[in-house]
Structure formats: C-alpha cells, structure tokens
Amino acid sequence: METISVSRLQHELEELLHEHRPDGQEGQVAEYIPALKQANPTHLAASICLLAGEQVQAGDVDIRFTMQSMSKVITLAMALMDCGEACVFEKVGMEPTGDPFNSIMKLEIMRPNKPLNPMINAGAIAVTSLLHGSGTEEKVERILSFVRRLARNPAIGFNEDVYRSEQETADLNRALAYFMKQYEVIEGDVEDVLDVYFKQCAIEVNCWDVARIGAVFANRGRDPETGEVIMPEHVAKICKTFMVTCGMYNASGEFAIRVGIPAKSGVSGGIMGVVPHCMGIGIYSPALDEKGNSVAGVRLLQSLSARWGLSIF
C-alpha cells in the first residue's frame, strides 16, 4: 500500500461508502435465523485500524452486530494454541470447498469423513469441540475473554436473542454435528458443543472491534498498540491463510482475485479484513448475496483495494 495521509484515507473512505451504500438494495438480510431478519438492509459501516494506531471510520459505525462466522477465525486460533496443529488437522482438513458453508455432502463422500476446512460450519463446529474448558460456561467465557483481549474492549458480550434464535433453528448444524460424532470427529456431548458454537456466533461487536481484531492478525499476532504477543506468529499465519482460501465461503477465489486480502465474512453482514503489516478492516452491511456475503461490503472492499493497492498478490 502506498503511503497515504490519514485525512485522505478518511475522505476517500467516506466517498466510497457513499458510493456503495445503495448496493445493499441488491441483497437480502439473512432470514433462516429469525433474529437476523430485523437488521436494516440500508446500513453500511467501515472501520480501519492502522498498525501505527490511527483510526479511520465512516457510516453507521455505532451499530452492533453478531460475529457469526467471523468467530470461526477466533476459535481456530484458540484451538491451535490449546491443542497444536497436529490435533486440529487430524479432525479438520485444510482444503477449500466449492460447496455452501452449511453443506453436508462432502462429509458423506470424503474419506476420512472429516470437514474440509475450519471455515465451513462443520469444520468450525469440530474446532469448537477441541477448545479446552471444564464445561460450556468456561469455554464460552474463554472465547469471550479472548475476543475482548483482541479488540481491547472488555464490554463485549453475546446477544441472547440471536443465540436463542440460532439454537431453535439449527437442525442442519445438528445434522452436521451428529454425523461427525458418528465418525469420531467430535467427541463428548454434541449439544454441549453446539451450545458453545451458537454462543460464539452470537458474540456482539461493532466495526471498530472487528477492525481492531483484524489488526492483531495483520500485526502477526501482536497487539498493534502495546506490542503484546496475543497469539504466536505461526497461528496468525495459519488463520490468515484460511481466510484467503476459505474465508468468503464459496466465493473465496473470486474475492482473492478482485480484492486480494485475507478476509472472513459472517451472515450478519460483517466482514473482517486483514492487510498484513498494514491494517485491520471491519465492515458491516447486512444485505447478503446468494453465497452469504455482504453485497455492499464486498464491493466497498473491492473499491478500497483497487484505490489503495491493498492486494497481497
């Protein structure tokens, strides 16, 4: 990325956000989780946390939303630190999939019967099952504590309504989990594992929180303000690699070509972007395309990448 003043970044972010706000009209908010149906499809917000400490924001940045699949990056980092690479990748593969994020098909036809990667639902559920803790409450508190530390925001909690809504409409996730239990990908009580998974997805953040978390990954696992090592560099590297290959569901290849940065989306409309050695980006716009990615959010990131030269390729 070329050197650009913070004032210019602010001006251009506001300009591009105004340009892309109408794009949300082309998508639809997630309806299969009833609590997410209440989102306003016209909302669009973006926050940027530069590694030098500067903050650039525009749009509806006060809106809070749930992490959903963005949390998969967090729990992957935790599982790698808890169990090590060998244990994690014995249960979950490293390959992209061209199937939807909640598909069961590859689980049935692949040998061994394990999820292809940690960014699809089956893989994320398997990863969550590996987290250390004496019970669901302790595991959820560990995840919350880690997110708070990454974002430097002790007030982060989870949205009870979204959690309940996910829990009550999770037949497909239950099918994935029980299938994996049959093949010993998941050990222990399936409902306990799913309870932790639903709560991690319901963790509530704003765009600045997401940008701040992204900045830690951009800074090789170190807090950009204090230099504190929050995760080992090799863990941050693995997570960023999965964000490139699998982070935008089955649109990850196109996103890599058009935007070219590690990113992870969620069906709440959030996107966490990571520009290595440069910045973390938080985007929110709840109207989604058919693959589950924010329509306006993806287009805004594409424009930012083109204008500022953000692609890592």
Image (cartoon, rainbow, N blue to C red):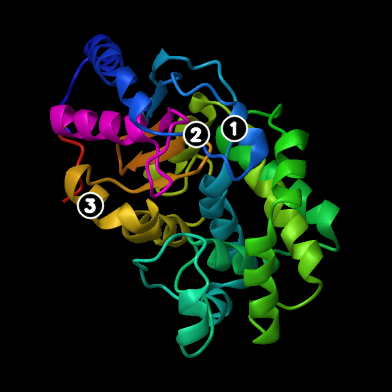
Q: Is residue 293 magenta?
A: yes
Instruction: Give the residue type that dot 1 points to.
Output: Lys
Instruction: Give the residue type that dot 3 points to.
Output: Glu
Q: Secondary structure at mark 3?
A: helix
Q: Which mark is residue 15?
A: none
Where does label 1 land, which residue?
Answer: 37
Where does label 2 land, which residue?
Answer: 29
Instruction: Give me the residue at 65% from left, 66% from top.
Output: 82
Q: Are marks 1 and 2 in contact (CB under 8 Å)?
A: yes
Rounded to the nearest angstrom, the CA distance separating label 1 from label 2 is 6 Å
Instruction: Give me the residue at 66% from left, 38% from top.
Output: 34
Instruction: Give the residue type that dot 2 points to.
Output: Val
Q: Is residue 184 left or right of residue 10?
A: right
Q: Which residues are magenta?
A: 282-308
Q: Which mark is residue 254?
A: 3
Q: Is residue 235 left or right of residue 307?
A: right
Which of discs 3 and 2 lies nearer the camera? The answer is 2
Rounded to the nearest angstrom, the CA distance separating label 3 from label 1 is 27 Å
Q: Looking at this rendering, what residue extends furthest in the bottom direction?
A: 111
Residue 136 percent across, percent down from the top left: 82, 57
Placement of 221 over or under 183, stated as above or below:
above
Quadrant holding the N terminus: top left
Q: Of label 3 and label 2, which has the lower sequence position?
A: 2
Residue 100: image quadrant is bottom left
Q: Of label 1 and label 2, which has the lower sequence position?
A: 2
Q: Is residue 104 left or right of residue 7?
A: right
Which of discs 3 and 1 lies nearer the camera? The answer is 1
Q: Is residue 30 magenta?
A: no
Residue 168 percent across, percent down from the top left: 76, 50
Residue 247 percent across, percent down from the top left: 40, 53
Instruction: Give me the residue at 47% from left, 35% from top.
Output: 269
Placement of 2 over or under 262, stated as above or below:
above
